[in-house]
Image: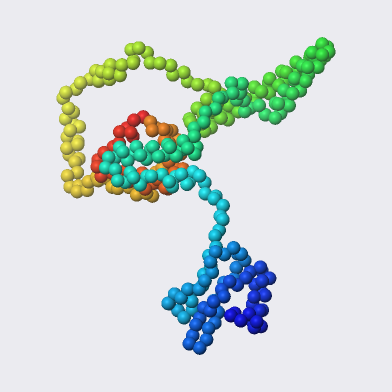
């Protein structure tokens, strides 16, 4: 290939030229005492090369060939992922206080979502009427009913009024039947949570109100339950004998806390059904969206709690 006037060199370059590819190595890649040859080639269709060369790597008798060129790749990485990877969560590993570790984790998560997925509030349309039992057939009946009423208003004829009344009564009966069937299906099947959700959509809510004045003092309620139990100072001897005779004195095993792993933490998080947010405004959905990146830091905090026999005050608040 050092001499392109040869038949073999010309044929090889012509084959690659049909694919719009050129050979860029022009220096010999193998040098012997009495000969030099170009055996290591690079064919490419990239035209804007920044560098081409041959390097003696001192490993084999063939030199290393290379080319350099830049790629303008589109930035398809989501902004949320970039911001997640930029979180300075490594700092919490160096904190001594568990409360500080947890506060940093919570702050970073909330700042991340406030930036990339801020909370938006929408005003509910007061005119919205939840009525899933209004089927396409009922909508057609309502259309025919309204058309008959409009016609009666124009003609004032008794026959037209009777036709409208017949369609009105038939439509009302159909709506009652569809509604009854829909509610029977919804409330005869499903769990309590699904039923309560359906009641909320129907605007049927439980009016909790406020506690009566005589129940607003929790200490008084506690005293009431304490005094309502008979204070039996003499223990039940028969019960004491039962426990005394059924003790296992030869057991050597005992309970110990063990440190958690990232896989255990991820498995627990995935199996949490509730999406309710705690006092820190962070729910399971937010945490799972940040996993598995934040799983090591959650595992670290939990293991620190186990090692130090400490439960963060933030997790005690509801």
The image quadrant that residue 179 belongs to is top right
| Foreground of the two, 100 or 66 | 66
Which residue appears farthest toward the bottom when viewing the image? 34
Up/down of 62 relative to 115, above or below: below
Instruction: Tell me where residue 265 appears, x and y as whole percent.
Output: 37, 45
**Quadrant (top left/top right/bottom left/bottom right) for the N terminus:** bottom right
- The coloring applied to the image is rainbow
152, 121: nearer the viewer: 121
Q: Is residue 11 left or right of residue 146?
A: left
User: Image height check: is 281 above or below 210?
Assistant: below
Looking at the picture, tell me which residue is in the foreground, 238 or 114.
114
Residue depicted at x 20% and y 40%:
246
Q: Is residue 15 left or right of residue 115?
A: right
Would residue 166 be found to the left or right of residue 272 on screen? Answer: right
Residue located at (60% from left, 25% from top): 130
Quarter containing the C terminus: top left
Q: Position of residue 122 (x, y in %)?
A: 54, 27
State whether residue 69 appears in this view.
Answer: yes
Residue at (43% x, 16% y) in the render: 209
The number of discs equals 0
Percent coordinates x, y for residue 191 in the rendering: 49, 32
Position in image of residue 207 (x %, y %)? 46, 18
Left or right: residue 297 versus residue 70 is left
Specify whether residue 284 is in view: no
Q: Is residue 99 above or below residue 227?
A: below
Identify the residue shown where x is 54% and y is 69%.
Answer: 52
Q: Can you tell which quarter of the image residue 154 is in?
A: top right
Quarter location, residue 155: top right
* Of 209 and 252, the residue lying toward us: 209
């Amino acid at each position: 290939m050092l001499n392109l006037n040869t038949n073999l060199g010309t044929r090889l370059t012509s084959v690659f030229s049909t694919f719009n590819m050129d050979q860029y190595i022009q220096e010999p890649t193998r040098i012997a005492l009495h000969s030099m040859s170009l055996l290591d080639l690079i064919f490419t269709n990239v035209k804007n090369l920044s560098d081409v060369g041959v390097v003696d790597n001192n490993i084999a008798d063939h030199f290393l060939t290379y080319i350099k060129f830049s790629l303008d790749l589109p930035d398809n990485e989501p902004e949320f992922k970039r911001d997640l990877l930029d979180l300075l969560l490594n700092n919490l590993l160096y904190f001594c206080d568990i409360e500080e570790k947890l506060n940093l984790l919570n702050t970073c998560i909330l700042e991340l979502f406030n930036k990339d997925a801020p909370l938006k509030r929408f005003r509910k349309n007061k005119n919205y009427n939840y009525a899933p039992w209004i089927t396409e057939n009922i909508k057609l009946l309502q259309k025919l009913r309204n058309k008959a009423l409009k016609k009666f208003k124009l003609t004032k004829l008794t026959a037209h009024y009777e036709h409208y009344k017949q369609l009105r009564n038939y439509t009302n009966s159909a709506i009652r039947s569809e509604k009854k069937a829909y509610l029977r299906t919804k409330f005869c099947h499903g769990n309590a949570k699904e039923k309560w959700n359906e009641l909320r959509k129907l605007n049927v809510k439980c009016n909790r109100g406020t506690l009566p004045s005589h129940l607003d003092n929790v200490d008084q309620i506690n005293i009431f339950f304490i005094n309502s139990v008979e204070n039996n100072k003499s223990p039940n001897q028969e019960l004491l004998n039962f426990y005394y005779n059924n003790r296992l004195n030869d057991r050597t095993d005992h309970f110990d806390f063990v440190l958690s792993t990232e896989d255990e933490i991820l498995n627990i998080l995935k199996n949490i059904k509730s999406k309710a947010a705690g006092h820190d405004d962070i729910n399971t959905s937010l945490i799972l969206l940040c996993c598995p990146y934040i799983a090591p830091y959650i595992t670290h905090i939990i293991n620190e709690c186990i090692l130090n026999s400490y439960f963060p005050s933030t997790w005690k608040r509801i």
